Image (tube, rainbow, N blue to C red):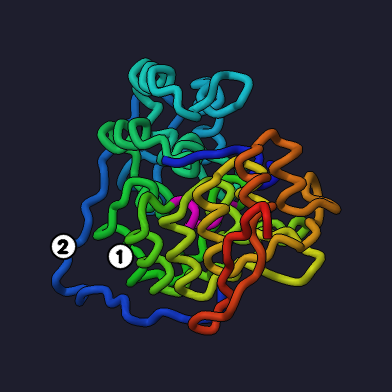
Amino acid sequence: MAPGTHIGRGTRHGERMKTSFAAPDARSLPEPRGHGTSLSRTRRRRDTAGRRPSMTHEEALEIVRELRITSAAHGTVHGDFDRVKAALDGRPDAVAALNALDSAKVEETPQGSAAHRGCREILEYMLQRGVAPDVFMMCALGMADHLRWALRRRPELANSRGAHGIHALNHSADRATAELLLHYGADPNYPIYEAWDWTPVHEAAANGRIDVLSAVCDYGGRIDGPYYCTTPLHAAARNGHAAVVRWLLENGAGCDPIGKGGPYEGRTAQDMAKENGHEPIVAELDGWRPGSSICGLPSVVRVSAGS
């Protein structure tokens, strides 16, 4: 799935790097407990030590397909809490199957789908039922202690990519969670979809997430680029996020770049707003021009119709 074609909540600014965020000493944190699951009538095998039964990825995938909660053709996990609850309640081995899935072998897992769209009610129910939280669930639910514990042991998880290649940063429930990832090395300019110059900054703008957007920009996320590139302003304008458009303009985003790839090809941010019927944004972009430089960043000033 191409980025920006779905909008969830919870859902390439300057080169400044923020270093003041400090995680507490690991010794002060309790180790997060896992979530037990039970297996019922399904094919099983013993692990290499022969101690407890487990389920293969292939077995789990077969069960998850039967649950019919992930494919877009079936109403999906994308916000349909009642459907997901009924599926998990109706099959005793459903939770074990979700825990046995290898996310590297599928486009998205049900929990991954819920996490990148910020379906909090679904994620909380999955957690309650015993689905083991991965880094994406931790981010989407704001599980800071669990996330900090995981990142201390495996810092590379900060640049994890979940369903459809979406970066862990764009699963963050809040600024604090995003800052935790950034502190442990998450790259705000990580290329997610190179054909569109797409990065976590673009994804945050496309989803209307000013909290995440401001965090990634504080850690060096870029809001502008060369003349021929897709910018976060393109993404926000296309999806009608007026507050994000204004924030980007106030922080130095230029209106002139020509988009690259897909629906952005050959279009300015104003073109994107116009094509998608966002007239207030069209007017907003039409009334701004670069102003003087403040703190090393170009500011913008509002231009009246008579200027």
Circle 1 packing at 10 Å, graded few (<14), some (14-19), many (20+), is many
Q: Residue at x 38, y 26 (%)?
A: 93
Q: Is residue 305 magenta?
A: no
Which segment is the magenta one? 166-171
Q: Residue furthest front?
A: 306
Residue at mark 2: 30
Quarter of the figure with residue 163: top right
How many numbered marks are there?
A: 2
- Whole-percent x, y for residue 8 in the image: 50, 39
Q: In this view of the protein, which residue sits in the foreground, 37 or 216?
A: 216
- Identify the secondary structure beneath mark 2: loop
- State how far apart marks 1 and 2 are (Cα): 11 Å
- Whole-percent x, y for residue 277 in the image: 69, 33
Residue at mark 1: 148
Lateral position of residue 138 relative to residue 185, left or right: left
| Tag nearer the camera, 1 or 2 | 1
Quarter of the figure with residue 107: top right
Magenta stretch: dominant secondary structure? helix
Choose the circle earlier in sequence order: 1 or 2.
2
Amino acid at circle 1 = Arg
The quarter of the rendered structure image containing the N terminus is top right
Amino acid at circle 2 = Pro
Q: Which mark is residue 136?
A: none
Q: Residue at x 46, y 37 (%)?
A: 114
- Identify the secondary structure beneath mark 1: helix
Circle 2 packing at 10 Å, graded few (<14), some (14-19), many (20+), is few
Q: Is residue 167 magenta?
A: yes
Residue 260 seen in this snapshot: yes
Quarter of the figure with residue 281: top right
Q: Residue at x 55, y 44 (%)?
A: 241
Q: Are marks 1 and 2 in contact (CB under 8 Å)?
A: no
